[in-house]
Amino acid sequence: MSSLPNTHEVLLRNDHLLDGRVAILGLSDPSVLSQCPSAGLAMTEHAGVFKSMASYTDWQLCFGYDSEGLQTGAFDTVIVFLPKARAELSLRLAMAQFLGRQGASLVMIGEKKEGIAGGSKQFLQAVPDGMKVDSARHCQVWNGTNSQPKDVFALEDYLEWTSLTCAGIEVSVAGLPGVFSEGELDGGTRLLLENLAEKPLTGDKVLDFACGAGVIGTWLQAHRRSEDNEPGVVDGVDVQAQAVACARATYERAGAQGDIYAEDGLAGLKGRWQAVVTNPPFHSGVKTDTSMTEQFIRQVARHLVPGGELRLVANSFLPYEALLQRFIGPVQTLAQDKRFTVYRAFQRLPR
């Protein structure tokens, strides 16, 4: 049985802080819930973690920040785990201030390597009397009083819109702290979209894996319309609650067609697509982590129709070409610049 993450171990080490009704924000391992003194609210923005929380029926379970049934001032203690994306901390602290009653205990726990030193400065802005109360397992614990509670907390208040143009096509993209918050198209996605303009996908039913804020699907349909073609349907899937919220908002504003699914990888998806397109993530926090993409490559063939196409962009140093060849079919390099490569692979036809 795997051990708990360091932050969760440190929470249990400080279980004396779990006083009264408790809310835990940013959970990454649900097994910690059974070791808490009493049930309360548990929030994760990771779709896989959320599914694995289902058996904890005595807890109020939340997927991300846009959950029904949240009440202001309902909790005596709110635990905030430091998010991987620093920009997201402002959102998590605001939710904590909303959930905690006046005078509630607010606790932040984070690892040093993931930026707790900088995060503590943000914590002190929201919790002026906060202080470090423990340091263990490469983590710090900060604690203070909810002296600035919030009466309102609505995710849509944090949405920001950015207008982007690529290959002559303009789209408006929703962003949230930690999701498209820089408001710029990354180099890999730009190269992919330029390649899609030059060598369009065939097929009307497309899946955008790790869709983020919905840029690719929205752009793809707008580009098809500009060529007087049917836009088709571009479904999207992402593991993170904020990305799913952004993609749905982006699609709604653009009138784009497709469902946005919250799933950890492809295992929970049913059906097949004529094409799958992706700019997959390769970071987990501060570390390079290709495991999600490698798992995706192993699974994607069963979600492509025979002869269906995968179009993938990745940093050129990542070892994906051999995996594509092995698990999908013949691979071509369609585009390349100093940093990124666009690959195309076709699902092998059954013999």
Image (tube, rainbow, N blue to C red):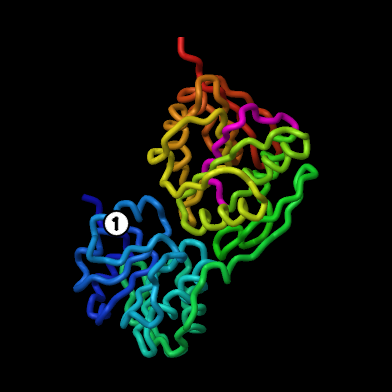
Above or below, 71 relative to 342: below
Local packing at callout 1 (Cα closer than 10 Å; few below 14, some 14-19, many 20+) is: many
| Magenta span | 198-212
The stretch drawn in magenta includes residue 201: yes
Q: Which residue was labeled with disc 1? A: 53
Is 334 covered by the magenta stretch? no
Quadrant of the image occupied by residue 37:
bottom left
* Chief SS of the magenta region: loop
Instruction: Please tell me whether mark 1 sits on a helix, a strand or a loop.
Output: loop
Name the spot of residue 339 as percent of width and height, x first.
Answer: 66, 42
Closest to the observer: 345 or 165?
Answer: 165
Relative image position of residue 253 (x, y in whole percent): 65, 55
Name the residue located 37 percent from the left edge and 63 percent from the top edge. 62
Q: Amino acid at mark 1?
A: Met
Residue occupying image coordinates x 45% and y 85%: 149
- Relative horizontal placement of residue 2, taking residue 115 as reference (left or right): left
Instruction: Classify residue 198 as left or right of residue 3.
Output: right
Q: Position of residue 76 (x, y in %)?
A: 31, 83
Question: In screen coordinates, is 141 left or right of 121?
Answer: left
